[in-house]
């Protein structure tokens, strides 16, 4: 038992040393990061909201612009609406297959993005979440080059998270961090309905 | 322009119809779900904390057991500690390569898991997060069969999220939902240090 423990200690010391060496080579980012959460799996928006919670824990100021107003986002909105450290903007009229009007959706998306750009360049925010903006890009409500310009124009200290499936390659190239959420197994596959508190 | 808009409307109506037909075939889960967030990418714990925020938004009761106490988790803990609807338990003495004592880590993990089992079976919680439990399993501090039994013994209404890379296959088989967070691009690759509010 103590041999096992010695071997374990040695392996852990090795891991610790490697970790410290790796960290010592890093430099601080000289500006806020751009993160993209994409993929077909769950957790793209949820993890952005988890980062929001983390930022609030550090007393940071947060902005959220929702490019799709789905009823399944109610739980988060109810919760985070309690916090004065968050500015929350939800665009127009809900999800595309409810409005079924491309011109109206494009107008709403462009207004929401103008709001996002003003927030990103203001210097007032540590973190801004552009929730489901990738969907607005996918439907061509927004132009990827314009979004890239908006990100590039962000204030030095502002990090931005873009969520939604089918992220544009040019934006993934621009981003500092891209995570793909992959659906390995989903209860919908087993015919189970979305659940309050878990899915929305 | 109006032709484009008509075509868009038709496509959206089609999508809406398909979505509604798909949803009509679903049934409500007769018990809380088991979710696993695994993979090498970011967002495993963050998205669990996003779901916690969502659950709190619905007035649900939440339990969190942290199997690894890393200093990078400070933001979330600071934030969620404000909420009386959350019971928060952090196991023993921090990350394995800091303690470097397998027996001590195993003891701490088993105590944390006993706490988790008591919470899961109590019927007092809508959602319980077993944060980084997959790491405790990976280092054999816990036995996968015992964890499966603990999950199976959960109260009917309690959903459980297990996080951490290298999730055990037997637990993924048991889970209702498994999401793999895949690292497509990471700022560490570009030599950038972890940032407060984003990474911890």
Image: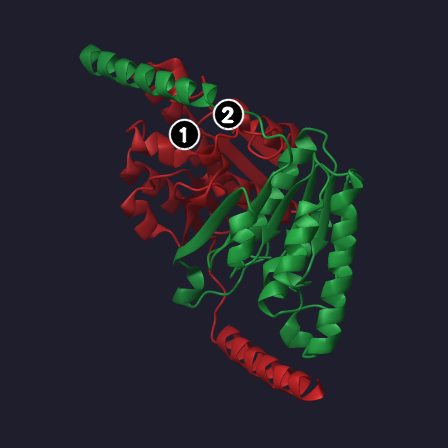
Chain colours: A red, B green
Secondary structure under badge 2? Answer: strand
Q: Residues within 10 Å of mark 2 (few under 14, many from 20)?
A: some
Report if residue A37 is visible in the image: yes
**Residue B182 pos. (x, y %):** 42, 54
Total marks in image: 2
Query: The residue marked by circle 1 belongs to what chain?
Result: A
Front residue of B95 and B38: B38
Left or right: residue B102 versus residue A87 is right
Query: The residue marked by circle 2 belongs to what chain?
Result: A
Left or right: residue B171 versus residue B68 is left
**Residue B139 pos. (x, y %):** 60, 70
Image quadrant holding the C terminus of chain A, namely top right
**In the image, which disc is placed on residue A171?**
none
**In the image, which disc is placed on residue A90?**
2
| Residues tagged by mark 1 and mark 2 found on one chain of the structure | yes
**Residue B116 pos. (x, y %):** 74, 52
Image quadrant holding the N terminus of chain A, namely bottom right
The answer to whether mark 1 and mark 2 are in CB contact below 8 A is no
Report if residue B76 is visible in the image: no
At 37% from the left and 40% from the top, the residue drawn is A150
Left or right: residue A131 versus residue B162 is left
Where A182 sits versus B132, above or below? above
Where B97 sits versus B152, above or below? below
Front residue of B48 and A119: B48
Secondary structure under badge 1? Answer: helix
Which of pointers 1 and 2 lies earlier in the amino acid sequence? Answer: 2
**Residue B75 pos. (x, y %):** 66, 53
For discs 1 and 2, the disc positioned in front in the rendered view? 2
**In the image, which disc is placed on residue A114?**
1
Where B15 sits versus A144, above or below? above
At 71% from the left and 87% from the top, the residue drawn is A2
């Amino acid at each position: 038992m103590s041999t096992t423990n010695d071997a374990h200690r040695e392996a852990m010391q090795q891991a610790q040393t490697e970790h410290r060496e790796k960290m010592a080579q890093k430099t601080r980012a000289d500006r806020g990061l751009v993160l993209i959460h994409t993929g077909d799996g769950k957790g793209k928006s949820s993890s952005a909201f988890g980062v929001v919670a983390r930022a609030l824990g550090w007393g940071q100021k947060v902005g959220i612009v929702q490019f799709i107003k789905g009823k399944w986002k109610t739980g988060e909105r109810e919760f985070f609406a309690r916090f004065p450290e968050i500015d929350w903007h939800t665009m127009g009229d809900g999800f595309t297959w409810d409005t079924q009007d491309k011109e109206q959706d494009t107008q709403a998306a462009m207004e929401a993005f103008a709001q996002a750009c003003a927030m990103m360049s203001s210097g007032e925010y540590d973190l801004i979440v552009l929730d489901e903006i990738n969907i607005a890009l996918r439907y061509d409500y927004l132009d990827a080059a314009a979004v890239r310009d908006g990100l590039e124009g962000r204030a030095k200290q502002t990090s931005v998270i873009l969520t939604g499936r089918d992220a544009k390659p040019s934006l993934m190239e621009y981003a500092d961090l891209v995570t793909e959420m992959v659906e390995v197994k989903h209860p919908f596959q087993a015919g189970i309905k979305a659940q309050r508190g878990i899915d929305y």
